[in-house]
Amino acid sequence: MVLPPDQPVVVGKPAIKEFVRQSMAMPGFSVTWEPEQAVIAAGGDLGYMVERNRITFADSSGSIRTQLGKAVVTLTAVGNPTATCTNPGSDTHQPAGHNPAPITVTGSEAIPASEIKNGNTPFAVVTNPPVTPVPKAPECPNSNWIEDITDMAFTSATISVEQPPGTVVLTVSCTFSSPTSDGAVPGSHVSCTSS
């Protein structure tokens, strides 16, 4: 999805490709983007970035205009889930078992130009919850049982910024020296790199 200034929303890959092609062909068109700060919350399930970006183009009268741009920010987090197995014949029978394999969860946020002030914009991206109950209950005694994810301990997270949407301009990848748990994660336990 692209949210161009004072224009209808552009939806779908073919439409976005055509929008970008037309934009790049415009005389005087340019895009500049500069990340200032990327942060992943202590729990590892939330990320935000402060950015500065500008789009320059010729308006309908031919005058060159500079306008604050838009971005899409995506958070992808990988975690070790904790799950319970429940016998469908008795809601109280939850034997100890193995936890499911690591799960990846994602979330994204589109940021319209109206929310960008002086070239900066905060954002808060929350991931979608993991699918639960887990289909076919692979870690339970048999596939007729119900396997519910009750918690996630995150091991890594990635923030991607697209400017314009569809063009990745920054990726920040973070790992946690030990999986996260409820509460704050010390900064010394988080290591991030950007590209």
Image: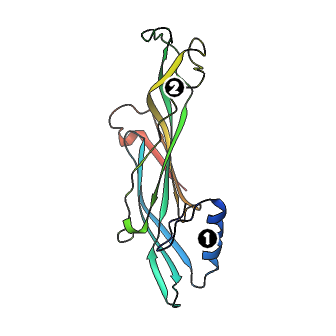
- In the displayed structure, 3 sits above or below 23; it is above
Mark 2 touches mark 1? (CB < 8 Å): no
Residue ID at (64%, 79%): 25
- In the displayed structure, 5 sits above or below 182; it is below
Q: Position of residue 148 (x, y in %)?
A: 48, 23
Question: On the picture, is 157 further left or further right than 137?
Answer: left
Question: On the picture, is 54 further left or further right than 122?
Answer: right
- In the displayed structure, 123 sits above or below 113; it is above
Please name the residue that numbered disc 2 is placed on. 133
Give amino acid for label 1.
Answer: Phe
Q: Secondary structure at mark 2?
A: loop
Question: Which residue is more in the foreground, 128 or 120?
Answer: 128
Residue ID at (56%, 65%): 10
Q: Quadrant of residue 17?
A: bottom right
Q: Residues within 10 Å of mark 1 (few under 14, many from 20)?
A: some
Residue 120 seen in the current view? no
In the drawing, what numbered circle is on residue 19?
1
In the drawing, what numbered circle is on residue 174?
none
Give amino acid for label 2.
Answer: Pro
